[in-house]
Amino acid sequence: MKKGVHTEVIVLKCMYIENMMRPYLEVDVAESIDMIAKSIDFIPDINNVEKLTKELIATSPLYHLVTKGLIDDEKKVAEAKNDEESYQWAFSQNYMLYVQIVLNMIMVPLFDKLMNERGLTSELIVNKIFAWPLMSAKNKPFVELGIKKFFDGDYVSSIHILVPQFESTLRRMFAAAGYATTSIKKSTAQHEETFNEFLNRDDIKEALGERIHKLIQMVMVDQMGINLRNKVAHGLITFEQCTKGLNLLVIYLFLLLTNYLVVKEENNASE
């Protein structure tokens, strides 16, 4: 690529990023957080990712012949053994690429500006989340501490606090809406479904909506995604993985939940 063309591409990318951030910087900081919570611009469009994945496979005739697997913590955690698994592997890679690009090029710079130039504080984030009617009082002290740790720059502590609290908050949200979150085992005692089993339920997928459900799934439990819930729960996450961007992604998931309410007449959750 010629130098002039390369420079033009960089300028266009910068303009695109600035245009994406501008609406959130032209309003009061509290309104900006409201807009971020409601926006799906930061979430991959599943149809677009599927289209890109199919095009990639169609233009790469040898794609299915290439061994595809995922090594994590020196263990093979996933491997594509057939065409369907190869497609899912490629889809997951493209999906997470979009997440990382948006996170690192738009969301982190946006929050940096809001924090450094517009006076965004942990209290404003906490107030937004705590104003949500489905926020359980049992989770509030932990979530408040986790968000404060993020603003203190202690991303390790914040992630380890907020990730299990997100799972708990999501389960309690559905419990408040009348959804079962437990299963009966042979002993007849009630046991919490694993988070992966819970998210795989059709009623949970339908209530969350495809786009937000996929983001939560890829971030929290999918081995081809970040698998954050399981890495934190089992002590597999590394110090280096506890970044500002990853921490912000978890906070964004909390903000997304504030869009859901209980519709009593349908006994269901509504976006």
Image (cartoon, rainbow, N blue to C red):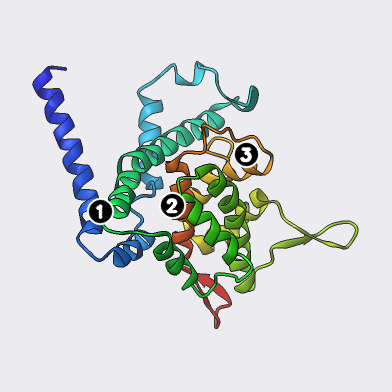
Q: Amino acid at mark 3?
A: Lys
In percent of width and height, residue 236 lies at 64, 34
For discs 1 and 3, the disc positioned in front in the rendered view: 1
Q: Nearer the viewer, residue 49 or 152?
A: 152
Q: Residue at x 37, y 39 (%)?
A: 98
Left or right of residue 69: residue 14: left
Q: Nearer the viewer, residue 29 or 194?
A: 29
Where is 33 relative to 157, above or below? Answer: below
Residue under label 2, please give it: 151
Q: CA distance from mark 3 to mark 2?
A: 23 Å
Q: Amino acid at mark 2?
A: Phe
Left or right of residue 33: residue 70: right
In the displayed orientation, state which residue is furthest to the bottom. 265
Q: CA distance from mark 1 to mark 2?
A: 14 Å
Where is 118 relative to 241, above or below? Answer: below
Q: Amino acid at mark 1?
A: Glu
What is the secondary structure assignment of the residue under circle 3? helix
Q: CA distance from mark 1 to mark 3?
A: 34 Å
Check the picture and name the quadrant holding the C terminus: bottom left
Where is 237 relative to 26, above or below? Answer: above
Residue under label 1, please give it: 117
Q: Which label number is shown at residue 231? A: 3
For discs 3 and 2, the disc positioned in front in the rendered view: 2
In percent of width and height, residue 157 lies at 56, 46
Q: Which label number is shown at residue 148? A: none
What is the crowding at mark 1: few (fewer than 14 residues within 10 Å), some, or many (at least 20)? few
